Every structure is written in C-alpha cells, then in structure tokens.
Image: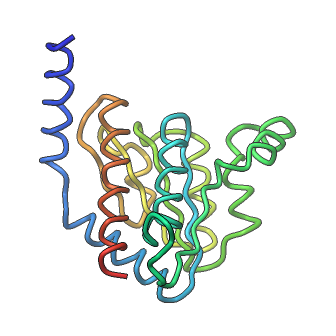
Amino acid sequence: MITTANKYLGELQETISGLPLKTLEKIKDILLEAHQKNRQIFMIGNGGSASTSSHITCDIAKGILGHTGEKKSKRFKIISLNDNVALMSAWANDTIYDNIFSEQIKNLAKKDDIVIALSASGNSPNIIKAVETANEISCITIGLAGFNGGKLAKLTDICLTAKIDKYDIAEDTHLILGHILTRWFFENV
C-alpha cells in the first residue's frame, strides 16, 4: 500500500509542478470579468469530471462566501449542467448521449457567457459537441484536460492541460485547480 501511495503522490506532485500557472491566471481573469459583468458560467463533465464540475460549481457559488455565508460579496452566476439528470437522460434517450450538454447550452447560453469543459482525455464526444455549440453562440470556452489536451485543447479559447496520461491524476489536478480559484475569489472578491 505504501509503495502505491508514494507512487501516486509522486505522480500527482510532478503533474502539479508542471502546470502552466499563467494559464490558470488567464482563466481566473476570464471568470472575474464574467463575475463583474453578470455573465453566466456553465460547467460540464462526465464521470469523475462530472463530480468535479459539481464540486467546483458549489465552491465558487457558495464557498467564496465563507462557511456560513458570512462574507457579503457579489455572487457568481454558475451552474453545473451535469446536475440536471432528468434533462440529460431525456436528451440521451430521445436523441443521442452526445447531445446532453449541447442542447442545454442552446437553451441557456448567450454570447460572452462562459462554458468550462472538464475532460481528462479531452476527447469525450458530448463535451466536444457542447464546446462546438458554445463556440457557435460566441461563448468563451475554457477547457480543463489531461493527457495531451485532445480535441478540447484545440476547440477552446483557453485550455489548461494536466500533462499526464492517467485519469485519476488528471481529475485530482482539476479539483485542485478549482480549489485554487475558489480560494483566490474568497480572498479577493
């Protein structure tokens, strides 16, 4: 067990050390501008990335206000589209799974809104289709990817890629990035 833990933590540490923090700074600036201009932020992800999408959404929507909401600051308009299971399953059942996010984006997004797509591989068809739809609407698209960024890195306006070919480490890295953003917003907004 200890060998596995040491190996895992070493891989995570190496991945975190190699992150392009200037890209994270640019993402923070995009989200801060969205906050200041009352733009909507949409988060999407599959599997573990869906959980991370929900977690980051919760942290930015509520976490920046403090544990009990004691900090009285302007709130972010942020929602995780993977939290509407009924709507996702309706689109998947009645059309194809690839539509579960793109159709929601068509309903809700406007020009200059933000779509943050999480995909460890960067190649999930429903994520790619959602980003393409967001781009058609002229949303600002942000990717959080792993591996080499996949198609997501090429389609988004900005993509932060955790350079590792392991889903678990990529997903952990994305959650850490969400926590960094949340802490910055808590301390500065």
If the image is split into quadrants, where does the N terminus sit?
top left
Asked if residue 21 is positioned above or below residue 120 in the image, the reply reads below
Q: Residue furthest bottom?
A: 37
Q: Nearer the viewer, residue 129 or 119?
A: 119
- Expressed as whole percent of the image width and height from the top left, the position of residue 112 reads 55, 80
> Which residue sits at x=31%, y=28%?
166
The image quarter in which residue 21 lies: bottom left
> Which residue sits at x=34%, y=78%?
29
Q: Is residue 67 left or right of residue 109?
A: left
Asked if residue 102 is positioned above or below residue 38 in the image, the reply reads above
How many dots with numbers? 0
Colouring of the image: rainbow
- Expressed as whole percent of the image width and height from the top left, the position of residue 20 reads 19, 58
Q: Is residue 115 left or right of residue 136?
A: left
Asked if residue 21 is positioned above or below residue 40 in the image, the reply reads above
The image quarter in which residue 125 lies: top right
> Which residue sits at x=20%, y=35%?
12
- Expressed as whole percent of the image width and height from the top left, the position of residue 132 reads 58, 58
Q: Nearer the viewer, residue 47 or 115?
A: 47
- Expressed as whole percent of the image width and height from the top left, the position of residue 27 reads 35, 69
Q: Residue furthest right?
A: 94
Q: Nearer the viewer, residue 1 or 22?
A: 1
Q: Is residue 184 left or right of residue 42?
A: left
If the image is split into quadrants, where does the C terminus sit?
bottom left
Q: Is residue 144 left or right of residue 92?
A: left
> Which residue sits at x=56%, y=39%?
46
The image quarter in which residue 142 lies: bottom left
